[in-house]
Amino acid sequence: MQSLKITSAPQAGVPERILDTLNSSIICLDGRHQITYINAAGEALFESSATALIGRNFTSLLSALEPSSIVDKLHLDDVDFTEHEAIITLASGKAITANYSIYPFDSLSDGKADDSGILLEIRQLERQAQFAQDELKQHQQQATQQLARGLAHEINNPLGGIRGAAQLLQRALDRPEWTEYTEVIISEVDRLQSLTTNMLGPGHGMQKEPVNILEILEHIRKIILAAEPERIAIKRDYDPSIPELTADRDMLIQAFLNIVRNAVQAIDNEGEIIFRTRIEFRYTIGQITHPLVLRVDISDSGHGIPTALGETIFLPMITDKADGSGLGLPIAQEIISRHGGTIHFHSSSSGTTFSTLLPLDK
Ligand SMILES: Nc1ncnc2c1ncn2[C@@H]1O[C@H](COP(=O)(O)OP(=O)(O)OP(=O)(O)O)[C@@H](O)[C@H]1O
Ligand SMILES: [Mg+2]
């Protein structure tokens, strides 16, 4: 590192697009700690563009109130330094846990003093943990999907026969009090059939088209408010600049409706629900890092998810409701993962937020 001259990464012979594919933030500083280069992961970390960041003093990106050890270490002029699990508080107040390394360098090419600088690498640990969790979730989901589909298929097959036989029996019965029983059989078979269709789907072909997320969320808002206009307040906090995404509109409506219905069930009469849309830059879902990802947060001020349930809420048949089938979230997760996305949640006793992340790639 000592002989490396970096005033900007491309000049150092490393194509910028290669540094932009890294999940670590790479930041180059000059002798006065002004930023001379920052890669895409760094832009995402500091939630700003390279154009706005280059020329700024690095310490201005960190909290002045809670100084991080990283600031002192920048002054260790000629030793490479690494710290694990450091807490870095950003100027926005957001604290991250990261492993970071500092590599001072100077130029041997012309020996000018102001050619010296620092290459800083920051690896955010929350994101690493999130990648591992997403991967685990994907494996778990594939296994439960296979099980659920197999079961649904086996249950679905005899249902047609049972329904047909009950209809024949109904016609043959002459006492109305008996036909009540056949009606129960038929309506229960219908309920089971719609349940198994849900479990089998959405395994069938997707109809992808350009869709506008705001239009979808507004559609869902209308459906919910039509059912309970008095009880529910739905606030909106939309980013209007979000581009269209290519998706199956009906499936996305189903997925978000399942999440929103849970929110509606979780709040009491004074509760509120918020729909929020945002763009995330360079977000990794599973093993793929996408340049642009749409984030839709559905927050409710309800009772929260029982801690004992944890991530199991995404498994089929997990429910704490007397009349719940426990299929709402597994179906939503399946739909979103078929679109290359994922769902996370944060919950406490004062509310829950489900964040759905969908890639906006071409
Ligand atoms: N917003 C929320 N607030 C509190 N608990 C929630 C929320 N969303 C989900 N849950 C918990 O997760 C469980 C599973 O949700 P899921 O939608 O899969 O099934 P369900 O709502 O119980 O039944 P179904 O959706 O099939 O009618 C719920 O029973 C509930 O315990
Ligand atoms: Mg539900």
Image (spheres, rainbow, N blue to C red):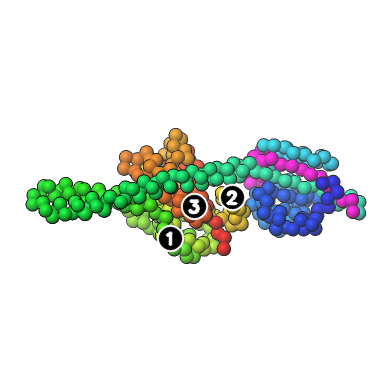
Q: What residue is rendered at 19% in x and 51% in y? A: 166
Where disc 2 sits, the SS reads loop
Decide which of tag 3 and tag 1 comes sooner along the chain.
1
Does residue 55 appear in this view? no
Residue 147 in sight: yes
Left or right for 254, reference 188: right
Relative to 222, is 170 on the left or the right?
left
**Badge 1 amino acid:** Gly
What is the CA distance from the residue labelled 2 to the residue labelled 3? 13 Å
Residue that badge 3 annotates: 337
Residue to which mark 2 is pinned: 287
In front: 156, or 49?
A: 156
The stretch in magenta equals 86-109
Q: Main secondary structure of the magenta part?
A: strand
Q: Is residue 178 magenta?
A: no
Give the labeled residue for mark 1.
205
Task: Please name which of the two marks, 3 or 1, marks the residue nearer to the observer.
Answer: 1
Identify which residue, 89 or 117, lies in the foreground. 117
| Residue 140, horizontal then vertical, whole percent | 49, 43
Q: Is residue 288 left or right of residue 68?
A: left
